[in-house]
Image (tube, rainbow, N blue to C red):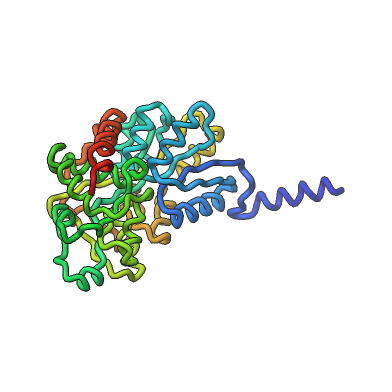
C-alpha cells in the first residue's frame, strides 16, 4: 500500500506544471560577480531540477584551476568572465567542442567568438573597458577631471588609481592587450610603467576597483564600464569615462570543461544560458553588459558600443596562449617589479 501511495504521489508531481524534479548534478565555475552567479544558478535549478554546485572565481583564477584539474576535472561548465582566458583554454584543449542549437539566436560577435575557438567557447555578453572616478573626491582635491588614458598617468593621480592584476583578472588583461593594440607595444609599456607609479593596489578581482572608487577608497578605478554603472545606479558619486583615445572590449564567454562528469547537464545549462530569458537575469542582478541573444532585453543603463570609441580588438591573437603568456611575463618584469 505504501509503495502504491508513493508511486501515486510521484505521478501527481510529474504532472504538475513546472514541477522541478531531481535531474542530477552540475558544477559551475562562475567568473562574473557573485550577485549575478547566484540568481543564474537558482533560476536554472528551478527550471530543470538539476542541483548545481557553484564556485565563484575571477577568470584568470578559474583558468588556473581548470589547468590544475585537467587530469581529473571537477567542474562541468565555466560561465562568464572575459573571453581571452576562454580562448586560451580552448587552445590548450581544456574545453569541449559544442555547437548549441541556439547559436542562430545570437549576435554576430558572439558567433564569431565561437567560430574562432572551434566552438569550444561562445559569447554570452559584451562590455567596453574604461574607468570611473569619484566626483566628490575629485572636486574636494581640485583635480581636473580625467577624460583619457593619458590623464590618469598624470602626477596628480599619484597613489590614486586602482586596477586588477592581469594574472588573475581578465578585465586587467584586456586593459593590457588593449593598450598594446591602441598605442603599440613599446609606447604601451612606457605608459604602463608611468601608470604603475599611480596605482595604489592591484586587486584580484576585475570589478573591485569600481567599488573602491564608489566608496572613495581610491579616486580612480579601471574596470569594464558596466561595473562602474552598477555602482552609479546604486547611488555612488562616480563619473564614468570611455577614454578619448579609444578602448577595447570584452566578449564574456561560456565553455564546457573537457571531461566534464555531468556532460548532458552541462550541455543543457549551455543551451539554457544562451536563451533570452536566462540572459535577462543580468539586469535584475545589477549587471549591465550587452547580452548576446538578439531577443534579450538590453538594460537601459548598459553602455552602448555606438557611444564608445572602440578599437578593432583582435581576440584570436591576444587570446592565444603564446601572446597572453608573453605579455603577462613582460608586465611582471617591467611593470609590477618596477619601483614607484
Image position of 305 (left or right of 97): left
The answer to whether 19 is drawn above or below residue 229 in the figure is: above
Residue 292: x %, y % from top left: 33, 47
Q: Quadrant of residue 298?
A: bottom left
Image position of 15 (left or right of 173): right
**Is 222 or 276 nearer to us in this picture?**
222
As drawn, the residue found furthest toward the front would be 339
Residue 166: x %, y % from top left: 31, 43
The answer to whether 301 is drawn above or below residue 108 in the figure is: below
Residue 273 visible: no
The answer to whether 237 is drawn above or below residue 339 in the figure is: below
Residue 13: x %, y % from top left: 68, 52
As drawn, the residue found furthest toward the right would be 1
The answer to whether 334 is drawn above or below residue 305 in the figure is: above
- How many numbered marks have been drawn onto this rendered protein structure? 0
Residue 83 visible: yes
Residue that appears at 34% across and 71% down? 235
**Is 216 or 244 nearer to us in this picture?**
216
Residue that appears at 32% across and 59% down? 210
**Is 112 or 244 nearer to us in this picture?**
244
Residue 206: x %, y % from top left: 34, 50
Image position of 310 (left or right of 11): left
Residue that appears at 52% across and 46% down? 54
Residue that appears at 36% across and 55% down? 208
Amino acid at each position: 500500500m505504501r509503495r502504491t501511495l508513493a508511486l501515486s504521489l510521484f505521478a501527481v508531481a510529474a504532472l504538475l506544471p513546472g514541477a522541478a524534479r531531481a535531474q542530477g548534478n552540475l558544477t559551475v565555475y562562475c567568473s562574473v560577480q557573485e550577485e549575478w552567479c547566484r540568481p543564474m544558478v537558482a533560476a536554472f535549478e528551478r527550471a530543470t531540477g538539476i542541483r548545481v554546485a557553484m564556485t565563484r572565481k575571477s577568470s584568470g583564477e578559474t583558468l588556473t584551476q581548470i589547468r590544475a584539474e585537467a587530469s581529473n576535472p571537477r567542474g562541468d561548465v565555466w560561465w562568464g568572465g572575459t573571453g581571452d582566458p576562454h580562448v586560451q583554454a580552448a587552445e590548450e584543449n581544456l574545453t569541449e567542442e559544442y555547437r548549441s542549437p541556439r547559436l542562430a539566436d545570437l549576435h554576430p560577435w558572439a558567433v564569431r567568438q565561437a567560430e574562432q575557438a572551434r566552438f569550444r567557447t561562445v559569447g554570452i555578453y559584451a562590455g567596453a573597458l574604461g574607468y570611473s572616478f569619484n566626483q566628490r573626491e575629485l572636486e574636494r582635491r581640485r583635480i581636473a577631471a580625467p577624460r583619457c588614458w593619458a590623464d590618469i598617468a598624470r602626477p596628480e593621480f599619484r597613489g590614486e588609481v586602482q586596477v586588477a592584476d592581469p594574472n588573475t583578472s581578465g578585465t586587467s588583461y584586456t586593459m593590457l592587450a588593449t593598450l598594446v593594440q591602441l598605442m603599440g607595444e613599446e609606447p604601451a609599456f612606457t605608459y604602463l610603467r608611468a601608470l604603475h607609479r599611480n596605482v595604489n593596489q592591484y586587486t584580484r578581482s576585475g570589478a573591485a576597483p569600481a567599488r573602491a572608487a564608489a566608496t572613495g577608497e581610491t579616486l580612480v578605478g579601471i574596470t569594464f564600464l558596466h561595473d562602474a554603472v552598477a555602482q552609479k545606479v546604486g547611488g555612488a558619486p562616480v563619473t564614468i569615462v570611455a577614454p578619448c583615445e579609444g578602448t577595447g572590449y570584452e566578449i564574456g564567454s561560456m565553455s564546457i570543461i573537457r571531461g566534464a562528469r555531468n556532460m548532458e547537464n552541462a550541455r543543457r545549462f549551455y543551451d539554457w544560458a544562451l536563451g533570452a530569458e536566462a540572459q535577462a537575469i543580468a539586469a535584475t542582478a545589477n549587471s549591465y553588459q550587452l547580452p548576446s541573444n538578439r531577443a534579450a532585453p538590453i538594460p537601459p543603463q548598459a553602455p552602448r558600443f555606438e557611444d564608445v570609441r572602440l578599437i578593432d580588438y583582435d581576440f584570436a591573437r591576444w587570446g592565444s596562449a603564446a601572446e597572453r603568456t608573453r605579455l603577462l611575463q613582460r608586465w611582471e618584469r617591467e611593470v609590477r617589479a618596477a619601483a614607484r
